[in-house]
Image (cartoon, rainbow, N blue to C red):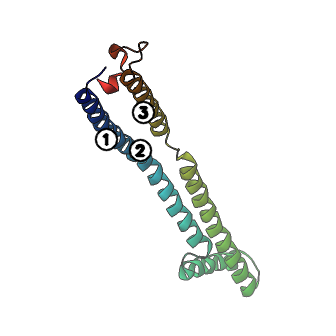
Amino acid sequence: MPKRTDIAELVSRITTDLRGIVSDEIALAKAEIKPALTRLLTGGALFIGAVVLALGAGALTWLGVAAAFAWLLAAQTSLSVWACVLLGLVCAIVLFLLLAVMLVALGYSRIKSARAPELTPASVRQSIAAVQQGVERGLALAEGDSDVSPGDQPDLLR
């Protein structure tokens, strides 16, 4: 039958190992989630930029482009001034909407490329399994089960 000090030492080592496992799992989760979070934030920022452009990123710029289109149309065609202004405004709207669509596509590709953590959940499952196995073997040893020998202890408990 194991001595009480052996069990206390075993419990102390298990506690220390569990603390190490938990801190390692947290560090792994941080390392794995940070790049995905960066990609998501970048993609979100690009979507915000697209919304700003789609709503008319700068009325003065939009009006300037529209006036330039109107001036070109008036110089190249025999349309009335108001028809040229109207077509210039339509051309400026189309140009800014195309820019907005390009930003949406770029933002979507950034968000789509972000991946969920893969290593952390697998590592946590392995750690839990090792702890459960260690506890089961420790209980079996404490109860004096003859099928389990002290040499069968997993690395976690040594």
Q: Position of residue 68 (x, y in %)?
A: 60, 77
Secondary structure of the residue carrying tag 1 is: helix
Helix or strand or loop: what does disc 3 sit on? helix
Q: Amino acid at mark 1?
A: Arg
Q: Which residue is disc 3 drawn over?
A: 127
Q: What residue is at 72 percent from the left and 86 percent from the top?
A: 81
Q: Earlier in the sequence, mark 2 or mark 1?
A: 1
Q: What amino acid is found at the position of numbered circle 3 in the picture?
A: Ser
In the rendered view, would you say 9 is above or below 116?
above
- In the rendered structure, which disc, 2 or 3, sits on the residue that comes first in sequence? 2
The structure residue drawn at horizontal position 53% and vertical position 61%, both measured from the top left corner, is 44
Q: Is residue 76 left or right of residue 29?
A: right
Reading the image, the residue beneath label 2 is: 29
Instruction: Measure the alpha-carbon separation of dots 1 and 3.
Output: 12 Å
Q: Is 22 left, or right, of 67 in this rendering?
A: left
Residue 16 or residue 87, whichever sits in front: 16
Asked which quadrant contains residue 5, the reply is: top left
Q: Position of residue 124 (x, y in %)?
A: 45, 37
Q: Residues within 10 Å of mark 1 (few under 14, many from 20)?
A: few
